[in-house]
Image (spheres, helix red, strand yellow):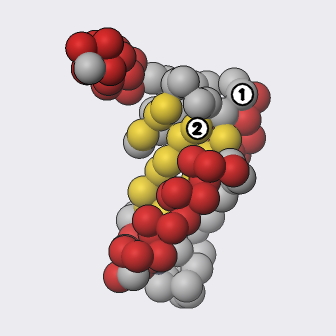
Amino acid sequence: MQNIARLNQQVLRAMERVVLGGKNPDFVNMLDMKIIEFLGCIWHHCKLCCPDSIKEDDLEERVEIFGAFGYETLYIWEHEMADMENVIKKVEKFIAEGSSI
Ligand SMILES: [Zn+2]
């Protein structure tokens, strides 16, 4: 149990300073090489919630950058949070099987 606590502390410390290709991902699991990012719909110009937004985000570029460092990335949009059961399933599937975006 003490080893797990120590490992969690190391992972959390690592999360604070993870910068990959100049990008700072939200949540990084360095042991399984997986990244989860939560995306605000307005901030990241969600095409579903903000169809009139003409600004493009750099989401595909981020996946490519993180992938170049060996990380898989999962995006969870703000609007998806309305169905937490689905978000949990999505995260569990990502942790078990991996996938991108
Ligand atoms: Zn949205």
Q: In the image, residue 98 lies at what x, y percent?
A: 68, 48
Beta carbon at label 2 within 8 Å of ligand 1: no
Residue under the point 55% across and 85% down: 48
Q: Quadrant of the C terminus?
A: bottom right
Please report whichever mark, 2 or 1, sits nearer to the chain's N-terminal start. Answer: 2
Farthest residue, direction front = 1
Q: In this view of the protein, which residue sits in the foreground, 60 or 92?
A: 92
80 in relation to 31, above or below: below
Q: Quadrant of residue 41?
A: bottom left
Q: In the image, residue 29 lies at what x, y percent?
A: 49, 32
70 in relation to 78, above or below: above
Residue annotated with mark 2? 34
Q: Quadrant of the N terminus?
A: top left
Do we see residue 24 in this rendering?
yes
Do we see residue 60 in this rendering?
no
Secondary structure at numbered mark 2: strand
Q: Which mark is residue 2?
A: none
Residue under the point 50% across and 47% down: 36
Under mark 1, the amino acid is Gly
Residue annotated with mark 1? 70
Question: Is residue 98 left or right of 77 when viewed as pictured?
Answer: right
